[in-house]
Image (tube, helix red, strand yellow):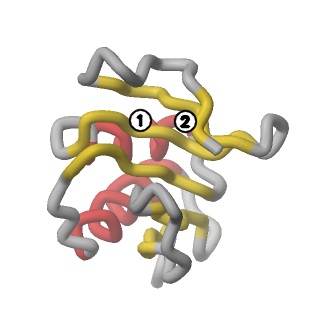
Amino acid sequence: MMFYRAELSSTPRPDGLPTVEIGFGEPANNDQIVPAAMAAIEKLNLAGGRGILFDGPASLPVAMALAHAVGHLYQFVACFDPKLERFVVAISHTPDVRPGDLIP
């Protein structure tokens, strides 16, 4: 069963930042979904770089686990906010991008 999915977007962004499209699969609880999300992100073999963007639904435990999994590979991690219609930086290790910054 697939409880959670994570796939790299096939649509390239002008800024070159990778976007990971995430989402729920089969109904399950977080004790099953979090490990499934970690397995899905691991399969992507992410190399790291300037920043990474996440787009799609996630529970709070899943979001925290995903951010932790990539937080040291990338200078910043951002997630899409449908209300703002932009990505919001959640984690940053670089002074030119700060948590709360918006990325179009």
Q: Secondary structure at mark 1?
A: helix
Q: Residue furthest front?
A: 14
Q: Is residue 69 visible?
A: no
Left or right: 49, with 25 as reference point: left
Q: For the point 49% across and 49% down, which residue is it?
A: 30
Residue 81: percent from left, percent from top: 71, 40
Vertically, is 26 above or below 80?
A: below
Residue 69: percent from left, percent from top: 25, 46
State the residue in front, 27 or 22.
22
Which amino acid lies under the numbered mark 1 shown in the image of this protein? Met
Left or right: 26, with 63 as reference point: right
Q: Which circle marks residue 64 in the picture?
A: 1
State the residue in front, 22 or 83.
83
Q: Is residue 76 visible?
A: yes
Q: Secondary structure at mark 2?
A: helix
State the residue in front, 14 or 85.
14
Residue 75: percent from left, percent from top: 26, 35
Residue 38 falls in image quadrant: bottom left
Residue 15: percent from left, percent from top: 46, 56
User: Which residue does the numbered mark 2 point to in the structure image?
Assistant: 60
Residue 100 falls in image quadrant: top right
Q: For the point 27% across and 73% down, which residue is it?
A: 44
Q: For the point 47% across and 27% down, which residue is it?
A: 90
- Circles 2 and 1 in contact, beta carbons < 8 Å: yes
Quadrant where the C terminus sits is top right
